[in-house]
């Protein structure tokens, strides 16, 4: 018997398919000196009650035949900011995605170059070069501003799938690169609550859709642990995607700021998964990472990335 959680998710996906499967969020054109400021990169508007905007892949649809790759990626050990079905002999994610802002004169100015080394290089918002390769990328940049993106700190997170190879993955990255993190004697004390947004891909019964969701984590700096949950899953256009809630199991972190990782569970579903993250500001006030969960009966697979900060804790003086 299909569990209640999966049935709710499936009903939501069927509802999206019945509406054409896509609730597109209109993106402004890429700035090229005629449609916007020179050397600008277009993003926005905000997605469904979140602080995320899309660079690419702003509709709900995604490749349908990705459930197997998603499930493998969901159970793969992340490496701090990447989690994918491409793993080493120890089951650890072999690729590490990074993002940087580059100038490509041939393509019309600035672009985000997303690379994991040898396996793929994509420039966003320009199309991915591989047939059957799909990428959705999101950022917490404020819509409408035009900072110098080569030096303005910002998160970029997303999910990708390569249908021909049956591979999939999620990533979180920061441009410019993440600063060195070493709490040392100045390590924060007490507890801090981190809240933010997640985005990724959800597959059930042969259908797949992109999602945004809410993330909440709590770090205990005295005990050196962090954990939380992702819930409020919804389509990019705001439609609810069942009652799915993924728990990011409590795990230890080190004072040297190294990446941390733990296990995931989902209420109402038998299965397993992994999550991981790393501090992103050098002082423990923000973090980013990835997470996944796959049901044992292959009825559900979810994979995504998140960004979160202790902004509310800072405002309250905690």
Image (spheres, rainbow, N blue to C red):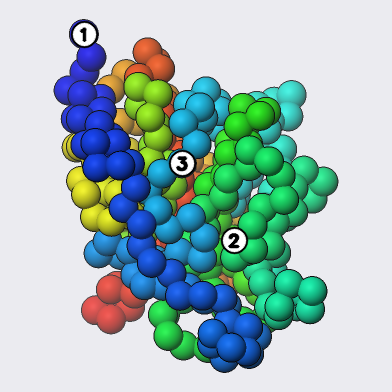
Identify residue for label 1.
1
Identify residue for label 2.
173
Q: The N terminus is located in which quarter?
A: top left
User: Is residue 310 visible in this depiction of the protein?
Assistant: no
* Mark 1 vs mark 2, CA separation in Å: 39 Å
Q: Secondary structure at mark 2?
A: strand
Q: Residue 293 sits in which quadrant?
A: top left
Q: Are marks 1 and 3 in contact (CB under 8 Å)?
A: no
State whether residue 102 is above or below residue 245. below
State whether residue 124 is above or below residue 272. below
Identify residue for label 3.
62
State whether residue 16 is above or below residue 173. above
> Sequence-wise, which precedes: disc 1 or disc 3?
1
State whether residue 204 is above or below residue 130. above
User: Is residue 237 visible in this depiction of the protein?
Assistant: yes
> Which circle, 1 or 2, is nearer the viewer?
1
Q: Determine crowd level at label 3: few under 14, some 14-19, many 20+ residues with C-alpha closer than 10 A.
A: many
> Which circle, 1 or 3, is nearer the viewer?
3
Give the percent coordinates (x, y) of residue 198: 39, 54
Residue at (47% x, 50% y) in the render: 305
Q: Are marks 3 and 2 in contact (CB under 8 Å)?
A: no
Give the percent coordinates (x, y) of residue 67: 47, 26
């Amino acid at each position: 018997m299909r569990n209640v959680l999966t049935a709710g998710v499936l009903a939501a996906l069927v509802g999206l398919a019945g509406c054409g499967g896509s609730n597109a969020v209109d993106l402004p054109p890429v700035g090229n000196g005629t449609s916007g400021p020179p050397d600008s990169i277009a993003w926005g508007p905000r997605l469904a009650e979140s602080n995320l905007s899309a660079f690419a892949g702003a509709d709900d649809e995604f490749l349908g035949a990705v459930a197997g790759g998603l499930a493998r990626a969901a159970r793969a050990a992340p490496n701090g900011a990447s989690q994918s079905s491409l793993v080493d002999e120890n089951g650890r994610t072999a690729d590490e995605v990074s993002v940087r802002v580059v100038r490509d004169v041939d393509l019309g100015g600035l672009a985000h170059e997303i690379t994991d080394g040898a396996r793929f290089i994509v420039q966003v918002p320009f199309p991915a070069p591989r047939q059957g390769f799909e990428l959705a990328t999101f950022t917490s940049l404020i819509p409408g501003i035009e900072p110098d993106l080569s030096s303005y700190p910002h998160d970029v997170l997303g999910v990708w799938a390569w249908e021909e190879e049956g591979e999939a993955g999620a990533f979180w990255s920061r441009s410019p690169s993440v600063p060195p993190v070493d709490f040392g004697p100045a390590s924060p004390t007490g507890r801090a609550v981190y809240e933010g947004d997640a985005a990724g891909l959800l597959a059930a019964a042969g259908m797949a859709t992109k999602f945004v969701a809410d993330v909440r984590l709590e770090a205990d700096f005295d005990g050196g642990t962090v954990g939380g949950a992702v819930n409020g899953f919804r389509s990019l256009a705001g439609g609810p995607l069942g009652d799915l809630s993924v728990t990011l199991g409590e795990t230890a972190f080190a004072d040297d700021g190294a990446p941390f990782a733990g296990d995931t569970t989902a209420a109402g579903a038998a299965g397993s998964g992994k999550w991981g993250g790393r501090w992103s500001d050098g002082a423990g006030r923000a973090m980013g990472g990835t997470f996944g969960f796959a049901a044992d009966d292959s009825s559900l697979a979810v994979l995504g990335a998140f960004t979160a900060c202790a902004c509310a804790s800072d405002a309250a003086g905690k």
